[in-house]
Image: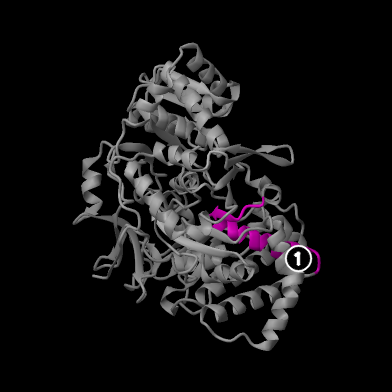
Amino acid sequence: MVQFEVPAIVPADPDANVSDLLAKRVEATPDKALFSVPNGDGWNDISAADFQTAVIALAKGLVAAGIQPGEKVGFLARTTYEWTLVDFALFYAGAVMVPIYETSSPSQIQWILEDSGATALIVESADHFAKFDEVRGDLPLIRDVWQLHVGAIDTLTAAGVAVAVEDTEIERRRNIAVGSDIATLIYTSGSTGRPKGCVLTHSNFVELCRNSAKALNAVVETPGASTLLFITTAHIFARFISHLNIHAGVRTGHQPDTKQLLPALGSFKPTFLLAVPRVFEKVYNSAEQKAEAGGKGKIFRAAAAAAIEHSRLLEEGKKIPFGLKIKFALFDKLVYSKLRAAMGGNIVYAVSGSAPLGPRLGHFFHSLGVVILEGYGLTETTAPATVNLADKSKIGTVGPALPGVGVRLAEDGEIEVKGINVFKEYWNNPEATAESFHDGWFRTGDIGSFDSEGFLTVTGRKKEIIVTAGGKNVAPAALEDPIRANPIVGQVVVVGDQKPFISALITLDPEMLPTWLGNNGLSAGMSLAEASKNEAVRAEIQRAVDVANGNVSRAESIRKFTILDSEWTEDSGHLTPKMSIKRNVIMKDFAAEVAAIYDEPVNTTNVAIGG
């Protein structure tokens, strides 16, 4: 059994809780800008001390409204400054937040509030309230609902003043919880079955933040460090980073509308980003298609090839040929500098998680001057278990274990985790908790491998491994990720379990498709249904499939594919909030399309056949 454990850098404090991260930040740098909020085309800073003042005022309002220590409060909102304000106000009031994705359906909202035993709910918008209102009659425990869009924060703050809640009461409440107590109850996104509530403790956040800040000091502890959050803070990835930023004193901005991301990056100018691979794919594909539209597609592709080669040679410690140096310098002026400027001009690092990024994009952005620190983790591990570090990084891996964390591989290759970040239990589900641990190690359900230095590579989900009729084991991700990198591809699901060959269901990307169509002399107004049958589109998908097939053996290659005339979204029920595919739902909903693929057997040659 291969195993790597890294000792904690910071001594554990079993009495500390999450509110201490803010209290100690205010003690250290009260006047330092901890947040920036939008103001027209600019941003207004909020100091650590002013943020804590707002937190305490809101906590007083929650206390005045009757919230008791240990009570659970649901929160349904987008990624904004107010999200973290509410988060810490609940900590200071001694309550436990139950975050809910803003895209959740009424039935999902009902399940989470019911299962958690929440007694109150905070929503951001009228739409959020309307979804809750559909199921309100089935939630008798919910006694209060506060709506941010109609001034709930001001109302609660005023109530705290009217009732004259003392500072000493807030200080008492924020100190009740110790490290082993529940800090938050986060429900998994539910790619299979009903979401399970993950009990994350105060120590999970505190110890992981304190140790991660030291491990990632070049990212979060450098002067002027700042980031713009746009991933939903209801997800553990962004939630952890928001806590880490408060601990480390990173200035944080928020942009919930990803369509406004580029203008926000341009005005905020962050030093590092937090993103999922799909964001980096979109940045690359958009730049490529924009260049193509301007007649400079050939230049962009040459620049990308030079960037990737340049980065590979640097990582391997090899000398850069003189010709490549000249090309790289030229492309830096023509291409790379413009992309850096589009991202704000100051980004040095980007933390990527939730799915494999792939070496191609890693090397491309590295040559732009953006080091992508790919990491790995789950809700059950409070986000990161491993991450590439500024001074210890290998593109194509998810890095070594963080301080205070152990990672090992079971005999079948399953990744198991133990340490300061591993959750306490599944809420009200002792059977699921017991099934998820092996000798005290959390079973992640992912398959991976280590290199000799302890850098982890994730190869796929254990339950998603396809076994063909011929007995060949196939990891879908090895085929899906390269295909998804194509600009007109939305999502991909590889199928073939107990079938004679591997095939794929593919959706088109409605955002990138019009640009690509226009660049290829086709009608940009073509519908998804029309595009799915268009020969030029099918030929482009065939090229993407051929690229993926070039990375695997003949027995693993895709023989047929079907382009669907619809897209998979979170609203359609086919994607999780972090844009992961719900494979079991897709296989059920598109069973007829899968069956049609195998109605006509094909010769298993090395060439994929569009179906």
Tell me which segment is drawn in magenta.
269-295
Quick one: which residue is furthest to the front in this view?
Answer: 28
Residue 602 x %, y %:
47, 73
Q: Nearer the viewer, residue 462 or 53?
A: 53
Q: Is residue 4 left or right of residue 358?
A: left
Q: Nearer the viewer, residue 422 or 586?
A: 422
Q: Is residue 501 above or below residue 65?
A: below
Quick one: which residue is furthest to the left in this view?
Answer: 439
Residue 186 x %, y %:
38, 40
Q: Is residue 533 magenta?
A: no
Q: Is residue 535 above or below residue 80?
A: below
Residue 427 x %, y %:
29, 38
Q: Quadrant of the N terminus?
A: bottom left
Name which residue type carries label 1: Ala
Q: Quadrant of residue 339?
A: bottom right
Rate crowding at label 1 as few (under 14), some (14 to 19) or many (20 or more) other CA atoms within 10 Å.
Answer: some
Residue 247 x %, y %:
46, 46
Q: Where does label 1 land, which residue?
A: 291
Q: Residue at x 51, y 50 (%)?
A: 579
- Any part of residue 541 in sight: yes
Q: Residue at x 81, y 65 (%)?
A: 294
